[in-house]
């Protein structure tokens, strides 16, 4: 089973590259935001728990989020693997994910980090803001603040996965197809012996 985590700051192209990787490797996409919305809409036990926290303006606890990830994996056992997008966000979540995968006799194969220059990201997000009308993509100060927060929260995770020899940084600047080729090469290099 090929399990991939894709990292990158806002505007790095995670969504675009995830879609291409899913198609190429036959993976299932795990976005905790999507899972949260689906579980709440279906009014599952976890969805109801999540709604209670959200209605109080509190963050949904890791145990609930990890439970949703486990439910999704259990419902997709035929999958060749999963691509985790936007999860884990913290060391405790990464640790919980490792334990969850271990219980299912699998593991994270590779963590791909899309590395993009901050000024380039600001340009991309301001352009996206004009197109989409998203308020959080229209103000440079807000965008730069999001990067500061991302860097503060994600750097410990990068170190966590580097210590496991799973992190690979990939240049996220330039042509989409070239970036995709580099991501694919990193996966093949690490998993070539797995017969991908």
Image: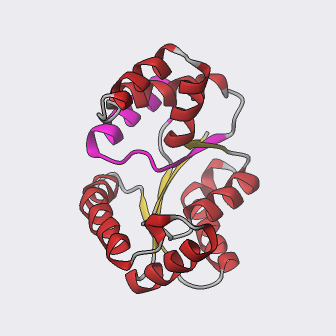
Q: Toward the viewer: 128 or 11? A: 128
Q: Toward the viewer: 131 or 50? A: 131
Quadrant occupied by the N terminus: top right
Q: Residue at x 30, y 28 (%)?
A: 56
Residue 9 located within the stretch drawn in magenta: no
Q: Residue at x 47, y 65 (%)?
A: 135
Q: Tell me, yes or no, if residue 25 can be seen here.
A: yes
Q: Tell me, yes or no, if residue 105 can be seen here.
A: no
> Taking 88 as reference, is 55 above or below it?
above
Residue 28 image position (x, y, % from top left): 66, 41
Position of 1 with respect to 68 (left or right) is: right
> Taking 189 as reference, is 116 above or below it?
below
Q: Residue at x 49, y 13 (%)?
A: 45
Dividing the picture into quadrants, the one containing residue 156 is bottom left
Q: Which residues are magenta?
A: 81-106
> Taking 50 as reference, is 109 above or below it?
below
Q: Farthest residue toward the top? A: 45
Residue 102 located within the stretch drawn in magenta: yes
């Amino acid at each position: 089973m090929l399990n991939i985590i894709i990292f990158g700051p806002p505007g790095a192209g995670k969504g675009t590259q995830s879609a291409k990787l899913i198609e190429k490797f036959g993976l299932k996409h795990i976005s905790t935001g999507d899972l949260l919305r689906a579980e709440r809409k279906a009014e599952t036990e976890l969805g109801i728990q999540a709604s209670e926290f959200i209605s109080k303006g509190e963050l949904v606890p890791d145990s609930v989020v990890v439970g949703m990830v486990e439910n999704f994996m259990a419902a997709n056992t035929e999958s060749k693997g999963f691509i985790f997008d936007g999860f884990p966000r913290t060391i405790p979540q990464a640790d919980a994910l490792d334990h969850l995968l271990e219980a299912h006799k699998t593991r994270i194969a590779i963590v791909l980090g899309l590395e993009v220059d901050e000024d380039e990201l600001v340009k991309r997000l301001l352009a996206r803001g004009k197109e989409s009308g998203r308020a959080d993509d229209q103000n440079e100060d807000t965008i730069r603040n999001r990067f500061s927060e991302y860097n503060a929260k994600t750097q410990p995770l990068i170190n966590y996965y580097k210590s496991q020899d799973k992190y690979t940084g990939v240049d996220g600047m330039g042509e989409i197809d070239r970036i995709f080729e580099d991501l694919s090469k990193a996966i093949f290099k690490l998993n070539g012996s797995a017969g991908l």
